[in-house]
């Protein structure tokens, strides 16, 4: 079954063609400002390189930075009403209370509180006041809100307030985008609410992007379903991406880690993914990225939805190398996607990390003679700075003092030395430069449950079985082939501060993508 994997990064757009476990072809193209231009170029280059028949492609998987870039830049966001059900509790910390001012302004600053919400056991804090909610909705619309984020205290336990409010919005404002916190975030009101508001603010852009990506693939003559990569290394179809754009935020490093596992055949290792601007370091466990155990800040907003545990440092192939009074500095400023024009080895005038890697004998790209004049002390010092920074990040990410295998991927991984402190070995597999696109192409479909259960004595096994089955059902509903779904992670945390044997149970299930007669 032919799969086409595409990953849109800040510097390059990578495309690969995979048949089962074989990589048939891989290309890189420069990312363009409109993003789809880079995809068009990459697809054309891949077709020239492999001669593949577009009609033979069964699925297209895309990883994109569209949505996280929009949030970081604070642009292209839809004015959003953040409506919470929690009164008379939660008044002290209203929605958007911990947001950066620039982002509050970017989404219109619409924040509202209504009575309601639930206790941990599902009993209501206060009754749903329909008249109150309808009045709030009218105020939000009058203020210019075009998208709605609904959150309720303990909605992962009981979502009735969010669901009822969504029904009223659908009745009064047919077609208006609505995001529900129990579908997006985990336990913990503020983090879940923030993730929901971010998602709601991106809904308009998500519709445009999904339409644009689908059209771009169709224009290339490919009549196959299009999927987008999620933060946890699984896939979602285009319609799901329109509703949950926030689920793509960390798809870049996640795809690289999944691709690293596929290429290296190492299911548990550290992955160093180096692009043009940054190095992302994560840990693979059983072939999937280790997930962050704490809330993750995105563009200054604390969120608690599924995110991989990734540590980034401002060192990439395009990082500026500068001599300063205190020594040599590498990054965080970078030439980014202009590397092929501005680096010395490509005839440019800017000294970059790629130049010192070539001068130091680590890489052979561009024209080596153009860096032959570099001061050896500058080259050695810059490479030592890079080595120390990478070793420090790997050391911070590993869970024990034992050295771990390190898989180096990404176009900038030419910077990684063969002998890295803290690594038992450094593996640079074939096709390492396009591991992100390969990770997208091999992605599976997942389902997750994260909920607080009341586990009475003797009922633990039954509760766990119920959670497992729900996770499997969610994976199948998301497009996994029935019978191929496995439980890949289960977490059970007793909540001693709550009565009634309350236990938070999180289960993740993953299965192969179902494509009708062309199952993966």
Image (cartoon, rainbow, N blue to C red):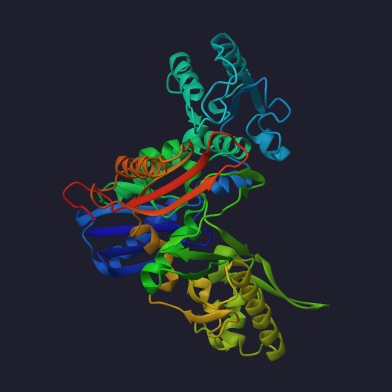
Q: In this view, does 377 lie to the left or right of 344?
A: right
> Is residue 333 shown to the viewer in this render?
yes
In this view, the residue farthest toward the front is 457
Nearer to me, 405 or 51 = 405
Give the farthest residue toward the left. 517
Is 205 rendered above or below residue 290?
A: above
Q: Residue 489: where, in percent of width, then height?
A: 42, 54
Q: In which quarter of the image is the N terminus?
A: bottom left
**How far from the left and from the top, in percent, is residue 329?**
73, 74
Q: Where is residue 139 in the image (x, y as percent from the top left)?
A: 62, 15
Q: In this view, does 182 lie to the left or right of 106?
A: left
Residue drawn where x is 30% and y is 69% of the image:
23
Which picture quadrant has residue 134? top right
Q: Which residue is drawn at 69% across and 39% down?
A: 99
Q: In this view, does 366 lie above or below 119?
A: below
Please say if 193 is above or below 322.
Answer: above
Q: Residue most toward the right? A: 325
Q: Where's the C terminus, which quadrant?
A: bottom left
Residue, x 35% and y 48% (percent of image)? 227
Q: Is residue 352 visible?
A: no
């Amino acid at each position: 079954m032919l799969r086409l994997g595409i990953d849109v990064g800040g510097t390059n757009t990578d495309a690969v063609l995979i048949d089962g476990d074989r990589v048939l072809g891989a290309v890189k193209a420069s990312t363009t400002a409109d993003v789809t231009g880079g995809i068009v170029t990459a697809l054309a280059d891949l077709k020239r390189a492999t001669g593949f028949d577009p009609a033979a492609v069964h699925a297209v998987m895309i990883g994109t930075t569209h949505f996280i870039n929009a949030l970081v830049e604070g642009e292209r966001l839809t004015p959003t009403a953040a409506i919470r059900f929690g009164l008379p509790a939660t008044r002290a910390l209203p929605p958007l209370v911990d947001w950066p001012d620039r982002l509050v302004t970017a989404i219109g600053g619409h924040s509202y509180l209504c009575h309601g919400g639930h206790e941990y056991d599902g009993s209501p804090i206060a009754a749903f006041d329909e008249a109150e909610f309808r009045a709030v909705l009218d105020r939000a619309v009058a203020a210019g809100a075009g998208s709605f984020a609904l959150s309720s205290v303990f909605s992962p336990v009981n979502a009735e307030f969010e669901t009822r409010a969504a029904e009223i919005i659908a009745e009064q404002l047919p077609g208006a985008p609505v995001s529900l916190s129990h579908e997006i975030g985990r336990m913990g009101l503020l983090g879940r609410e923030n993730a929901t508001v971010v998602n709601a603010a991106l809904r308009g852009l998500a519709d445009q992007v999904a339409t644009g990506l689908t059209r771009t693939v169709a224009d290339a003559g490919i009549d196959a379903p299009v999927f987008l990569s999620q933060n946890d290394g699984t896939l979602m179809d285009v319609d799901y991406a329109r509703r949950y754009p926030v689920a793509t935020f960390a798809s870049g490093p996640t795809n690289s880690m999944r691709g690293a596992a596929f290429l290296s055949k190492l299911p548990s290792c550290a992955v160093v993914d180096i692009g043009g601007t940054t190095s992302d370091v994560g840990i693979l466990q059983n072939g999937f990225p280790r997930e962050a155990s704490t809330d993750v800040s995105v563009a200054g907003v604390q969120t608690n939805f599924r995110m991989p545990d990734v540590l980034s440092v401002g060192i990439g192939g395009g990082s500026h190398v500068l001599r300063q009074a205190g020594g040599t500095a590498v990054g965080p400023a970078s030439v980014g996607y202009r590397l092929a024009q501005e680096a010395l080895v490509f005839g440019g005038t800017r000294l970059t990390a790629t130049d010192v890697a070539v001068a130091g004998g680590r890489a052979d790209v561009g024209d080596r003679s153009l860096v032959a004049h570099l001061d050896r002390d500058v080259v050695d010092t810059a490479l030592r700075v890079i080595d120390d920074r990478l070793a420090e990040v790997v050391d911070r990410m590993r869970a024990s003092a034992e050295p771990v295998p390190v898989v180096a991927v990404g176009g900038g991984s030419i910077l990684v030395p063969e002998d890295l402190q803290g690594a038992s070995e450094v593996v640079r597999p074939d096709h390492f430069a396009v591991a992100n696109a390969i990770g997208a192409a091999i992605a599976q479909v997942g389902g997750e449950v994260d909920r607080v259960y009341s586990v009475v004595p003797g009922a633990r096994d039954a509760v766990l079985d119920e959670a497992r089955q729900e996770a499997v059902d969610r994976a199948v509903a998301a497009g996994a082939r029935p019978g191929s779904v496995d439980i890949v992670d289960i977490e059970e945390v007793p909540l001693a501060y709550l009565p009634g044997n309350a236990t938070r149970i999180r289960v993740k299930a993953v299965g192969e993508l179902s494509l009708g007669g062309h199952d993966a």
